Amino acid sequence: MRIAPWLAALVTLPLLAACGTGPNPVTNALSGAEAPVAAAGADLVPVTVSVPPGAATAPFDEPREALVPAGWTVSVLARVPNARLAVWTPDGELLVSVPDDGRVLALSRTGEQRPLLDGLTQPHGLAFSPDGGTLYVAESNQVSAYAWARGAATGRRVVVPGLPDANSPDLRGAYGHELKSVTVGPDGAVYVSVGSTGNISVADRDATPPRASILRMPPTGGPAAPFATGVRNGTGLATAPDGSVWTAVNGRDNVPYPYDRPYGDAGASSFGKVVDAYVTDHPAEPLARLTPGRELGWPFCNPDPDTDPGVAGSAQDFTDVGLVADAELNPGGRAMDCAALAPVEQSFPAHSAPLGLSFTDGVLPAPYAAGALAGVHGSWNADPPRAPEVSFFPWRDGGLGAQQTLVGGFQDPSGARWGRPVAAVAGPDGAVYVTDDDAGAVYRVAPPGR
């Protein structure tokens, strides 16, 4: 759904509030049982990361420990500086994108690397067609398709041209989320994420093509059109076992307090103020199932996971999260009726910065046999910092259960980090492969006996 410019929006969209300019009410708590943040499980234990000879440069010039389920192991498969998103080929190689170098690498299961593609414009997202015959690469300015056969990608053709990036004339280099992600539906439709140019850049919604959106190219080809809007930075983009498309979204920073009441010990209303303690825990970051025309509300609406909205220290529930009006851009719902938007199916704690998203089905052992894997990059805008991890969301009856930590330990209590996962994908050998652009590594995280 497109939204008209700010003033015109007041009278033209069905999502608009008909009246009222006051702040959000504080009487309606979110429904659902309270859930812990990233339930780590009692069986997560520290293990030393195994590093092969010749790979023990920083941060592996000293022993590193990760937290994994009991009996699992973690090893460095390969050192790949600035490794980002990943996908397995039909031939059993792991493709890894390196946007900074304009290339895509192919890794064997033993860690040998070979260049697959180079000279690209910030390649990021990688996906195969359902039949495995086409590789799609999301560059910052377009989506390219390659014929795939016997480990080679040939016959490049541009299928989604003209995507905005920092080189777009109207943006003049100002683009905070220009890397794109891609997935393919079971019918062959291609979906590509187009991030916002900034934190609260309203003009993105009226750009051509709209930014802060997920675009869809039909299976028959042709122009890509908006499939979901109000998606600030849907870097996580993946197709579930039932064919549905999901996105994991980076939410806004420095969100102002949206309720007309004091927050914590404040002596007067905190409405519209940027309160550090509130910012640390808000807004939740969506993990949403996309349907045609899905609206996630950015920058006018923010997911609020508080079970007691507006109250400092409230417990938070990250399932079926409702949205509240942004105090800065949408006071009183003047630009968009946030209560009319569908709740977010699952979400991450504020400032988790989820990046890569993938689904696994029947490859990993229970209780991780079916679900979503997400690389959580960790925060800058939270105190204490949100820790990086690999998260798992179990697949249940066509939806996702609550977030669990599958791999942690990248951050110590002081907030210092030795790694930051980007993506996690299950391999054909029953292990999980994790890219880390901070440590410059690809890890193999293996269950017992794998």
Image (cartoon, rainbow, N blue to C red):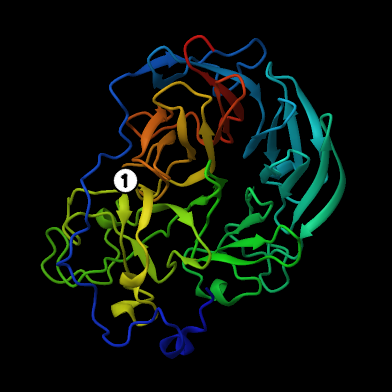
The residue at the point 67 percent across, 46 percent down is 124
The residue at the point 22 percent across, 50 percent down is 32
Give the camera-side residue of 424 and 319.
319
Q: Position of residue 26 (x, y in %)?
A: 17, 67
- Left or right of 111? Residue 324 is left
- Left or right of 249? Residue 215 is right
- Left or right of 173? Residue 102 is right
Give the camera-side residue of 309 and 328.
309
Residue at which label 1 appears: 383
Amino acid of disc 1:
Asp
Give the vertical position of 392 relative to 8 (above or below).
above
The residue at the point 84 percent across, 53 percent down is 157
The quarter holding residue 53 reads top right
Give the vertical position of 166 relative to 46 (above or below).
below
The quarter holding residue 431 reads top right
The quarter holding residue 81 reads top right
Q: Position of residue 111 (x, y in %)?
A: 69, 19
Q: Position of residue 406 (x, y in %)?
A: 41, 28
Q: Residue furthest right?
A: 155
Q: Position of residue 282 (x, y in %)?
A: 32, 55
Give the camera-side residue of 448 and 56.
448
Total labels: the figure holds: 1
Neighbourhood count class around disc 1 (C-alpha, 10 Å): few under 14, some 14–19, many 20 upward: few
The residue at the point 36 percent across, 34 percent down is 404
Give the vertical position of 140 relative to 395 (above or below).
below
Is residue 291 among the parts visible in the rendering? yes
Asked which secondary structure carries label 1, the reply is loop
Identify the image quadrant of the C terminus: top right
Is residue 82 among the parts visible in the rendering? no
- Left or right of 222? Residue 109 is left
